[in-house]
Image (cartoon, rainbow, N blue to C red):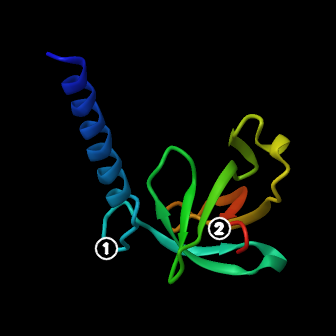
Amino acid sequence: MSLRLMATGLVGLALGFGMASAATADPNPDLTPAKSFNLDCGSAGVFPVVFVESNLGTFHVVDSTSIFQSTSLTIDGTLIFAEPGFNQNGLPELTCTFIGALTGRHFTVTGFFTPPAH
């Protein structure tokens, strides 16, 4: 197989995976993994969000193109994860809370909204 043909095939695969990823990123409250709740960010406001299944806490703000991306998660006072090195980039972060709809547990997330000018 020629190098050019192989490169074309790899680019096609990469584009195909990229489009599939973009399609699955759109949260749909009718899907089982999507959970709706209010994200309470104190003086910054309370935001109705839909949980987006990911390896980190990602919340889509309802009726918006904005996403809240968590950089740390605490459940009932126990740190579950913290994104290493994130605080070195100088981006402003918010700390928000919510109560788990199924568990009743208290969640605290620190993170940021995209786009940055939320």
Name the quadrant of the N terminus.
top left
Name the quadrant of the C terminus.
bottom right
Compared with residue 68, is residue 13 higher up or lower down, i.e. above or below? above
- Local SS, label 1: loop
Q: Residue furthest left?
A: 1
- Image spot of residue 6 (x, y percent): 22, 24
- Local SS, label 2: loop
The residue to which callout 2 is attached is 115
Count of marks placed on residues = 2
Viewer-proximal residue, 14 or 26?
14
Quadrant in the picture for residue 59: bottom right
Compared with residue 56, is residue 51 higher up or lower down, i.e. above or below? below
Residue at x 73%, y 44% (from the top left corner): 78
Viewer-proximal residue, 69 or 31?
69
Quadrant in the picture for residue 35: bottom left
Viewer-proximal residue, 66 or 37?
66
Q: Judge from the rendering whether residue 95 lies leftward or rightward of residue 23; answer left or right.
A: right
Q: Judge from the rendering whether residue 2 lies leftward or rightward of residue 58; answer left or right.
A: left
Residue at x 85%, y 50% (from the top left corner): 90
The residue to which callout 1 is attached is 30
Please tell me the numbered disc located at residue 78.
none
Residue at x 81%, y 45% (from the top left corner): 89
Q: CA distance from mark 2 to mark 1?
A: 25 Å
Q: Residue furthest bottom?
A: 63
Which numbered disc, 2 or 1, marks the residue closer to the eye? 2
Q: Amino acid at mark 1?
A: Asp
Going from the N terminus, do you reach mark 2 or mark 1 first? Answer: 1
Q: Amino acid at mark 2?
A: Pro
Q: Judge from the rendering whether residue 75 lies leftward or rightward of residue 102; answer left or right.
A: right
Quadrant in the picture for residue 39: bottom right
Q: Residues within 10 Å of mark 1 (few under 14, many from 20)?
A: few
